[in-house]
Amino acid sequence: MPHTHLDIGFTDYQPKIEELQNRNLDRLLEEMRGDADMRFSLDGAWLAEQYLRTRTPAARKELMDAVRAGRISIPAQYANLMAGGAGLETLIRSLYTGFALNRQAGRDTDYANITDVPAYPWAYASVLSAAGVKYFAAGANDDRGPQPLYGRWQTRSPFWWQGPDGAKVLMAYTRQYSNLWFICGLPPRAAACRESLPVFFQTFESPDYLPDTVLMFGSQLENTDLIPGEGRFVRDWNAQYAWPRLQLATFDDYFERIRKQYGDKLETVRGDFGPYWEDGFGTDAQYEALYRATESRAPAVETLSSLAALQRPEWEPPLDRIHRLWQDLILYAEHTFTSSGGYSRPDSEQSVRQIETKHFHVTDARESAHWIAQESISRLLDSIRIAPPAVVVFNSLGHEQRAGGDGPFERVGTREPGWGGHGA
């Protein structure tokens, strides 16, 4: 599965990571022009979004043509999140960009993946299924939080993961990512592969293991220059050895094969795989509190903006600010906190600047929420036309709520404007 992991930060400043990954896509597209077998799976829709933002129309077209042809796959998720620390609404919103880009390319959004961070809360299966995502790939870094590894879930993968509401996704769990690199080297070498593949296959030696296909999750080292030649290596290997056969594929290709051949024979499991890296949030408790407060407020201010925009036909909801609000919340929940040297050098410029970027996303989201709320309330007040002195309270809940607060308030009734909300 040609793929490289994305850390938005950690190994270098976030803007440098963005451009490094953009250049990797330049190299990938160049390689694909001369290698019809090459396939690649992006580690987040963020990668495609940044490439489309920073490249020429010709380069943008080439990328989307490759996506349209199924040679490059865009997952549902925006980035690799601390899924146990993000709220439910943030997990849902993190799928919007992936769906939009695949729709633009005329593709279905069938899969999501989480690489590195072992964070697979039970609700995520239901979130993915409700969105229409059928498949979920988890490539874990089990150095910390190795509970799925100790549970030997890699020996039972793939399987159907059933969420708390009964909905299911077909899940593949691997004990690590960058499999081709770990097994065969980088660039891959036949001698290393010949020695290491038997050890890799020991994971699947049980007579109860059904599939004849094994997922090798990832091939490159994260946030480094893309090394070409994977297509040539696979062809040379298959020309020399009768077994095992190597096949370049995307996550979509792998899951489709498994579902068609073994889908009705695989076991169904229920439960929470747990979040084990969310101590990243704990190290940043002050801003995590601001993040939580803004995250809980965001759906209410978005609802408020929609209702306010309905008051006059010439008014539009502030879609740009709403998008920016949710993007900031998603990027704060992205799994990188501080730099790779932050533990030993917390006061270094790298460590300080990278966490400042995370803090910016929180404060910017809070300001967006405040702006949207105040702008929308001003619109509503113009429509409600209550004579002063008065306090207008917006109830974003789906049921009537009693007003409260300090001061000598006198209830004068409930106003229900044309948009059907509840006043207080």
Image (tube, rainbow, N blue to C red):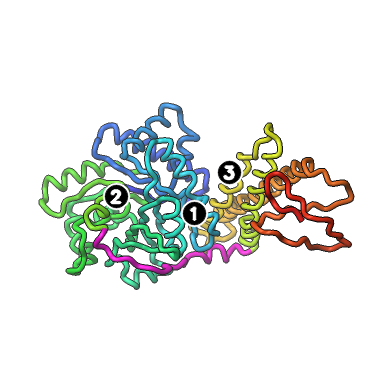
- Inspect the image, locate mark 3, and give the three-letter code of the amino acid beneath it: His
In the picture, the disc for residue 323 is 3
Task: Assign a secondary structure to mark 3.
Answer: helix
- Inspect the image, locate mark 2, and give the three-letter code of the amino acid beneath it: Met
Does residue 224 appear in this view? Answer: no
Magenta includes 279? yes
Q: Position of residue 312 (x, y in %)?
A: 70, 35
10 Å crowding of disc 2: few (<14), some (14-19), many (20+): many
State which region is magenta.
Answer: 264-285
Q: Nearer the viewer, mark 1 or mark 3?
A: 3
Quadrant including the C terminus: bottom right
Q: Position of residue 325 (x, y in %)?
A: 61, 47
Residue 378, image quadrant: top right
Question: Which residue sits at x=21%, y=48%?
Answer: 247
10 Å crowding of disc 3: few (<14), some (14-19), many (20+): few
Relative side of 70 to 12, left or right? left
10 Å crowding of disc 1: few (<14), some (14-19), many (20+): many
Closer to the N terminus: mark 1 or mark 2?
A: 2
User: Cα distance, mark 1 to mark 3?
Assistant: 25 Å
Return the residue at label 1: 10
> Which is nearer the eye, 192 or 413?
413
Question: Which residue sits at x=89%, y=50%?
Answer: 389
Q: Position of residue 158 (x, y in %)?
A: 29, 61
Question: Which residue sits at x=50%, y=50%?
Answer: 94
Magenta includes 193? no
> Which is nearer the eye, 129 or 179?
129
Question: Which residue sits at x=54%, y=60%?
Answer: 345
Relative side of 238 to 51, left or right? left
Does residue 190 appear in this view? Answer: yes
Return the residue at label 2: 1
Residue 401 lies, with reference to residue 8, above or below; the image says: below
Task: Assign a secondary structure to mark 1.
Answer: loop
